[in-house]
Image (spheres, rainbow, N blue to C red):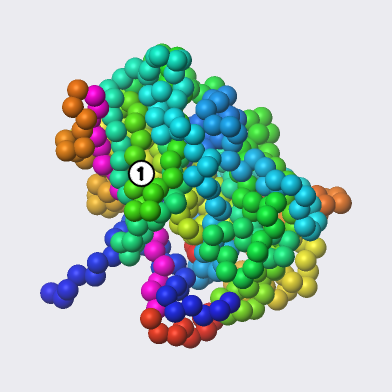
């Protein structure tokens, strides 16, 4: 027998269940205890950069919209800086939170984020990543939150040199990570949990 | 990115302790589970940063579910309990400033939700949610009533053990976690298809809060301890080699 390593084990995930909004977006659920729901406003004043709107729907394996999901978004500001306590590279936009939360619409399942186009953030080796947002999806029937990334289809050049996008073995699946430009400053990002159009999900 | 001598990326997740996506005993996972393998990459700044939630967002009663939805002078019905614990990372260090959000059914096992169909009554004085930010030692505490077990549509006769849902933000988005706390001694835990998505009994035990008589407030509330472990960062005391792939 050797000595034991003293690491703890990460707590196991359990599904957020059908009532995740009671805990994370109580005002959306009709429970007014807090002033407002976290993540409903990403812009707290005039922001730097291009303001954009992202919409989408999470689909299950039979193509039906998932109406009880909660989607979280985390991204850098227009300069590529994170509004985080451990951002050491500069001062992020003080009027931008970087964090959004959206419930799926109870009828259509659509989620909405009013945000800014993120700037480029370095990869571990210093190369720049293409503009992207981290998305995290939880719902009844999802045992552990699903982590994906939203990139922008109109960032062709940055996408073509992105350290992650270029390392994906099945390049035919890369379009599942690209938000489609549907209008001036409007993007669409549909997520497929399962099946032929299945979105790429990450273990990072 | 500058090479920092104490912070590497996040340690790879131990998937043997985490549930698979496809767990047919919990039927809703069947059509909501990705089939392709997850793509593994080392964490970047995008996963090593996390939103900031200041203590200023926390209201006076946010960690008191007995009173935060009750009419003045009234309180929620049910066994009064205190839930307390620490948020740590895998290296054993406390995680201060972690936002915890929790939600639960009332003492009868009923949620305050439009889609909830269980016949148990609503408690007019119970909303069912609260939140807290850990202190400099990673500690948190809240008061609530013990939730009741409830039946749910899955098998013909499936019941959830009494549980409290937790959502946790650490210092990096890679640590983001939602889980559930169970109560020591509940005979429904080993029967529950959702608890059983975990293959490792130790993982279920680590989600089961023991009764702590030492923290119990006499003539007032029993105490349950629930520690939460988030992913840890790699410690590197030598200068990092550039981490390519
Ligand atoms: Fe529940």
A88 and A140: which one is in front?
A88
Residue A203 place in picture, x, y as percent: 49, 62
Q: Is residue A22 left or right of residue B75?
A: right
Residue B159 in sight from this viewpoint: no
Question: Is A132 placed left or right of B135 in the picture?
Answer: right
Relative image position of residue B211 (x, y in whole percent):
20, 37
**What element does badge 1 sit on?**
strand
- Number of numbered callouts drawn: 1
Q: Which residue is mark 1?
A: B140
- Height in image: A109 above or below B156? below
Pointer 1: residues within 10 angstroms few (<14), some, or many (20+)?
many
Report if the beta carbon of the residue with label 1 is closer than 8 angstroms to ligand 1: no
For the point 28% across and 65% down, which residue is it?
A7
User: In the image, what residue occupies the spot 74% across and 72% down?
Assistant: A158
Q: Position of residue B199 (x, y in %)?
A: 30, 51
Residue A98 visible somewhere in the drawing: yes
Q: Residue at x 26, y 42 (%)?
A: B225
Whether residue B226 is in magenta: the answer is yes
Q: Specify the segment rendered in magenta.
A: B220-236
Instruction: Decide if residue B119 is on the left or right side of residue B209.
Output: right
Which chain is mark 1 on?
B
Residue B14, quarter of the rendered image: bottom left
**Left or right, residue A64 beside residue B201:** right
> Residue A93 lies in magenta, yes or no?
no
Residue A160 falls in which quadrant of the image? bottom right
Q: Residue at x 34, y 53 (%)?
A: B137
**Would you place residue B110 above or below residue B31 in this image?**
above
Which residue is more in the foreground, B96 or A167?
Answer: B96
Locate the N terminus of chain A and report the quarter of the image it occupies: bottom left
């Amino acid at each position: 027998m050797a000595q034991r390593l003293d690491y703890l084990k990460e707590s196991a995930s359990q599904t957020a269940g059908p009532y995740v909004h009671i805990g994370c977006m109580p005002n959306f659920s009709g429970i007014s205890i807090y002033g407002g729901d976290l993540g409903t406003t990403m812009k707290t004043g005039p922001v730097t950069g291009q303001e954009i709107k992202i919409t989408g729907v999470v689909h299950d394996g039979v193509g039906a919209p998932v109406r009880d999901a909660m989607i979280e978004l985390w991204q850098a500001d227009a300069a590529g800086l994170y509004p985080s306590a451990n951002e050491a590279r500069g001062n992020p936009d003080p009027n931008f939170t970087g964090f959004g939360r959206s419930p799926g619409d109870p009828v259509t399942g659509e989620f909405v984020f009013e945000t800014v186009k993120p700037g480029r953030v370095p990869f571990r080796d210093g190369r720049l990543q293409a503009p992207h947002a981290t998305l995290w999806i939880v719902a009844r029937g999802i045992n552990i939150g699903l982590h994906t990334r939203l990139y922008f289809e109109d960032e062709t050049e940055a996408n073509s040199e992105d350290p992650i996008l270029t390392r994906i073995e099945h390049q035919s699946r890369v379009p599942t990570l690209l938000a489609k430009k549907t209008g001036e400053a409007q993007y669409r990002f549909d997520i497929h949990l399962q099946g032929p159009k299945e979105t790429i999900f990450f273990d990072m | 990115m500058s090479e920092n001598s104490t912070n590497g990326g996040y340690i790879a997740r131990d998937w043997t302790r985490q549930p698979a996506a496809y767990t047919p005993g919990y039927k809703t996972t069947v059509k909501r589970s990705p089939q392709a393998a997850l793509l593994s990459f080392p964490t970047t700044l995008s996963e090593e940063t996390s939103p900031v939630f200041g203590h200023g967002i926390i209201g006076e009663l946010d960690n008191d579910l007995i009173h935060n939805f009750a009419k003045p002078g009234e309180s929620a019905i049910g066994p009064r309990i205190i839930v307390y614990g620490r948020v740590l990372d895998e290296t054993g260090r406390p995680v201060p400033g972690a936002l915890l959000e929790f939600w639960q059914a009332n003492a009868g096992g009923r949620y305050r939700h439009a889609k909830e169909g269980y016949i148990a009554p609503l408690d007019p004085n119970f909303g069912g949610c609260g939140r807290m930010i850990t202190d400099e030692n990673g500690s948190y505490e809240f008061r609530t009533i013990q939730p009741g077990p409830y039946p749910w549509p899955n098998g013909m006769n499936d019941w959830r053990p009494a549980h409290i849902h937790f959502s946790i933000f650490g210092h990096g988005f890679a640590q983001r976690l939602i889980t559930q706390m169970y109560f020591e001694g509940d005979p429904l835990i080993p029967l529950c298809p959702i608890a059983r998505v975990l293959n490792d009994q130790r993982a279920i035990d680590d989600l089961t809060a023991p009764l702590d008589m030492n923290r119990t407030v006499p003539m007032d509330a029993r105490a349950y301890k629930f520690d939460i472990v988030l992913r840890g960062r790699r410690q590197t005391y030598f200068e990092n080699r550039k981490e390519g792939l």
